[in-house]
């Protein structure tokens, strides 16, 4: 019983630092009373984890000695492995003591890791030897000793290959990729990440393959190769959807959302961010990430000047982060909210946000955070024409930013200072600040030129690596062909190979453009997940989904009204409506299925399963309803014919897949679809008509009016409800 209590005490100690002194005292008391060395070792480690860094050695060194004492005894393999792990934890405390100080003694750190390595070598524990060698490599990387880094990293990889530890092999190559990128060696960076992908495939390490593909996507993204970036991201997502690794799936989806955000592709960015929200809603253990997603969505709306939605999502983000007691994230959100208010001309609220942000930065003792808050406040007061306060905050910001390495921030601060001085009549000061701004801008332009050169270098290395692989493939194919030919046909076979290679390289760019076009067309026809499956397998299997929400819309009296319109006007009107519907459902993570005449069909909860599809679809339906009301009024004012809409929604199981082999389409089948269609035809214009199954899922979020059991064609009586509004 005492061991159980001790275990929970140790866990509780690590998780709740705000009660540190109380728990430290409890642990010290337990240490004094402990009778067994194994218990004392655990307590030393817990105390080391809980104390301030300056006190680490008080507990780490006794822990190492105690671990050695226990290891000297005759114990079984399992106990020995556990003790080695605890001894490693004690050494890590010592390393933290030496690294997290103002003057890190790297040589001392290496000395301790070498000591740890010697112990593992004596034990013959290969895995631990590999870990220690990898740690030493990292230290040499910090010291910019590239030769030593390579030496120890290669030793580490050799050990991992010897014991066939796939995870560490792949992680080793991924780390080499990051290192080579940092020094601008793109060829080696590409080779390293390709090695990580190949090893992952050979050893069927799906997670490693997915993360390596995502890392390769990052490389292409950072170097402007958007098609290749997206291709690698989608390949990574396909694997992660199979493995159902939620955290890694979240990270890669976030990368793709950010990728589209940088391309200013608002619809796609929101599509992926909404997928992240669905993951957060379904996985309680990563709920804190939803705060970041709300912030990203707020940024998307802000950059599109949709300030109302931007502030709405920033508020949601703040609410989440406040509940987690996170400090850094609220500061970032407050900064962005203040910028929105500034752009709206509401300088009072902008100042309020940025003062709150400044307070957090001061509590965190972040010099750079304080400086940036000062800069933002200077912008707010400048907008308010309070030049005295603006000048005060601007001067404070520049003083600190000059110590930092972020030239862009300092450049912005110098330009603002110039504008403040100019507005307040200080021509000399305005000139001096503007001169500094020009110097910094020129330096930034120089950096941009260097980046462009790096991108070109990366492209050259990428093309070179592809050409090498293509050459190998061509040679291998020619070699195979050669074996089938008689000896005197060798020259002709070789010539054919050379001719093939020449044509291949000449057509490469044309093929690349064609592939891009076909990929974009495929993604416009099919959901991205289905498109990827089709590209990889050549086919896509039909799948059963247990809970999907289907929506049908239809225009009342369409046939009669269409007879009164010209063909051009009719098509233009339908296009206007359906284009708006497309944009609305994209925001709510809903998949468009098809259009049948004037009927629009879509569904939530596929091809990626989620638990929010009923709410998503009803929200989308209400937005469509609102759009049609506004559009109807506009056409009335213009004296034009009007289309009134009916909307029907039902939730239940469906089967989804690709139909046909020519002009194929993604479609869904099942009684759920048929009932949704009946709900639309049994509804009323301007109303959202939902079934009892959908109502059961959304009743806590929407006000609904029960219509009773309504007779539906071929389906008997069905419980139906009109959605009146959100609760």
Image (tube, helix red, strand yellow):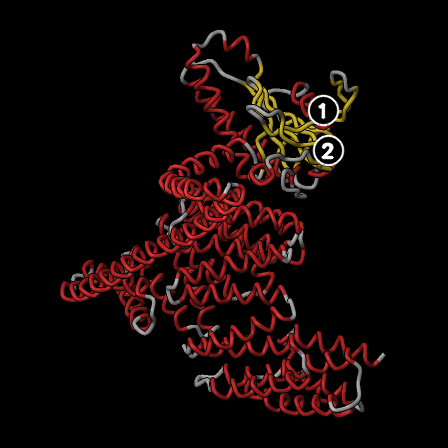
Label 2 to label 1: alpha-carbon separation: 10 Å
Quick check: can you spot residue 46? no
Crowd band around label 1 with a 10 angstrom C-alpha radius: few (<14), some (14–19), many (20+) = many
Give residue 96's position: percent from left, percent from top: 55, 82
Q: Is residue 436 left or right of residue 124?
A: left
Q: Is residue 359 left or right of residue 557?
A: left
From this view, report whether residue 392 is shown above or below residue 658. Answer: below
- Looking at the rendering, in which quadrant would you find the N terminus? bottom right
Where is residue 132, by image quadrant? bottom right
Instruction: Tell which circle, 2 or 1, labels the residue nearer the N-terminal end.
Output: 2
Instruction: Count the numbered circles shown.
Output: 2
Q: Is residue 189 left or right of residue 657?
A: left
From this view, report whether residue 246 is shown above or below residue 489. Answer: below
Secondary structure under tag 2 reads strand
Give residue 262's position: percent from left, percent from top: 41, 49
Nearer to us in this view, 326 or 195: 195
- Looking at the rendering, in which quadrant would you find the C terminus? top right
Give residue 284's position: percent from left, percent from top: 67, 55
Mark 2 and mark 1 in contact? Answer it, CB < 8 Å. yes
From this view, report whether residue 175 is shown above or below residue 646. Answer: below
Secondary structure under tag 1 reads helix
Name the residue at 42% across, 75% down: 146
Name the residue at 71% across, 34% down: 695
Give residue 140's position: percent from left, percent from top: 46, 79
Crowd band around label 2 with a 10 angstrom C-alpha radius: few (<14), some (14–19), many (20+) = some
Q: Which residue is mark 1?
A: 675
Where is residue 7, by image quadrant? bottom right
Nearer to us in this view, 285 or 465: 465
Q: Which residue is mark 2?
A: 652
From this view, report whether residue 97 is shown above or below residue 173. Answer: below
């Amino acid at each position: 019983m005492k061991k159980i209590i001790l275990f929970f005490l140790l866990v509780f100690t690590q998780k709740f630092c705000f009660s540190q002194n109380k728990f430290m005292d409890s642990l010290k008391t337990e240490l004094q009373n402990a009778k067994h060395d194994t218990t004392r070792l655990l307590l030393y480690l817990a105390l080391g984890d809980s104390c301030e860094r300056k006190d680490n050695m008080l507990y780490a060194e006794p822990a190492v000695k105690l671990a050695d004492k226990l290891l000297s005894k005759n114990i079984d393999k399992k106990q020995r492995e556990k003790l080695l792990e605890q001894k490693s934890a004690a050494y890590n405390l010592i390393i933290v003591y030496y690294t997290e100080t103002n003057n890190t003694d790297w040589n001392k750190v290496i000395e301790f890791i070498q000591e740890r390595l010697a112990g593992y070598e004596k034990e013959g524990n290969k895995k631990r030897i590999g870990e220690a060698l990898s740690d030493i490599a990292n230290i040499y990387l910090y010291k910019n000793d590239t030769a030593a880094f390579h030496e120890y990293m290669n030793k580490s990889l050799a050990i991992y290959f010897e014991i066939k530890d796939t995870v560490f092999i792949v992680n080793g190559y991924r780390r080499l990729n990051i290192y080579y990128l940092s020094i601008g060696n793109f060829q080696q960076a590409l080779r390293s990440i390709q090695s990580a992908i190949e090893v992952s495939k050979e050893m069927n390490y799906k997670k490693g393959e997915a993360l390596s593909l995502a890392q390769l996507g990052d490389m292409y993204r950072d170097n402007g190769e958007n098609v290749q970036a997206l291709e690698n991201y989608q390949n990574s997502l396909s694997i992660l959807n199979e493995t159902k690794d939620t955290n890694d799936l979240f990270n890669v989806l976030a990368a793709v959302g950010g990728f589209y955000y940088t391309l200013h592709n608002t619809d796609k960015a929101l599509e992926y961010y909404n997928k992240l929200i669905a993951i957060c809603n379904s996985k309680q253990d990563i709920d804190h990430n939803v705060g970041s997603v709300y912030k990203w969505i707020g940024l998307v709306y802000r950059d599109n000047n949709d300030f109302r939605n931007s502030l709405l999502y920033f508020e949601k983000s703040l609410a989440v982060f406040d509940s987690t007691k996170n400090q850094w994230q609220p500061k970032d959100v407050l900064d962005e909210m203040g910028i929105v208010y500034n752009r709206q001309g509401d300088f009072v609220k902008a100042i309020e946000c940025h003062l709150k942000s400044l307070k957090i930065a001061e509590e965190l003792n972040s010099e750079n955070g304080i400086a940036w808050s000062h800069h933002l406040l200077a912008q707010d007061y400048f907008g308010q024409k309070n030049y005295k306060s603006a000048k005060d905050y601007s001067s404070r910001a520049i003083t600190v930013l000059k110590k930092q390495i972020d030239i862009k921030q300092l450049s912005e601060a110098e330009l603002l200072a110039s504008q403040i001085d100019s507005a307040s009549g200080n021509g000399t000061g305005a000139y001096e600040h503007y001169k500094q701004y020009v110097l910094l801008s020129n330096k930034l332009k120089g950096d941009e030129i260097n980046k462009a050169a790096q991108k070109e270098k990366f492209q050259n290395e990428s093309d070179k690596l592809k050409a090498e692989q293509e050459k190998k493939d061509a040679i291998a194919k020619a070699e195979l062909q050669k074996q089938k030919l008689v000896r005197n046909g060798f020259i002709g076979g070789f010539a054919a190979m050379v001719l093939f290679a020449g044509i291949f390289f000449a057509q490469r760019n044309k093929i690349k453009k064609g592939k891009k076009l076909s990929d974009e067309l495929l993604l416009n026809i099919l959901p991205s997940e289905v498109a990827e499956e089709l590209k990889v397998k050549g086919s896509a299997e039909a799948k059963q989904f247990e809970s999907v929400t289907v929506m049908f819309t239809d225009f009342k009296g369409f046939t009669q009204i269409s007879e009164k319109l010209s063909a051009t006007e009719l098509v233009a009107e339908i296009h206007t409506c359906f284009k708006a519907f497309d944009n609305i459902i994209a925001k709510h993570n809903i998949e468009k299925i098809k259009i049948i005449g004037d009927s629009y069909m879509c569904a939530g909860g596929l091809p990626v399963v989620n638990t929010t599809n009923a709410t998503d679809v009803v929200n989308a339906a209400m937005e469509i309803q609102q759009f049609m009301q506004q559009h109807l009024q506009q056409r009335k004012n213009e004296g034009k014919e009007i289309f009134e809409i009916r909307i029907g929604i039902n939730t239940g199981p469906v089967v989804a897949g690709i139909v046909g082999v020519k002009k194929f389409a993604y479609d869904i089948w099942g009684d759920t679809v048929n009932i949704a269609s009946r709900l639309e035809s049994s509804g009323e214009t301007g109303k959202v008509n939902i079934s009892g199954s959908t109502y059961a899922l959304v009743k806590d979020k929407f006000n609904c009016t029960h219509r009773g059991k309504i007779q539906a064609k071929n389906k008997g009586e069905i419980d139906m409800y009109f959605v009146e509004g959100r609760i």
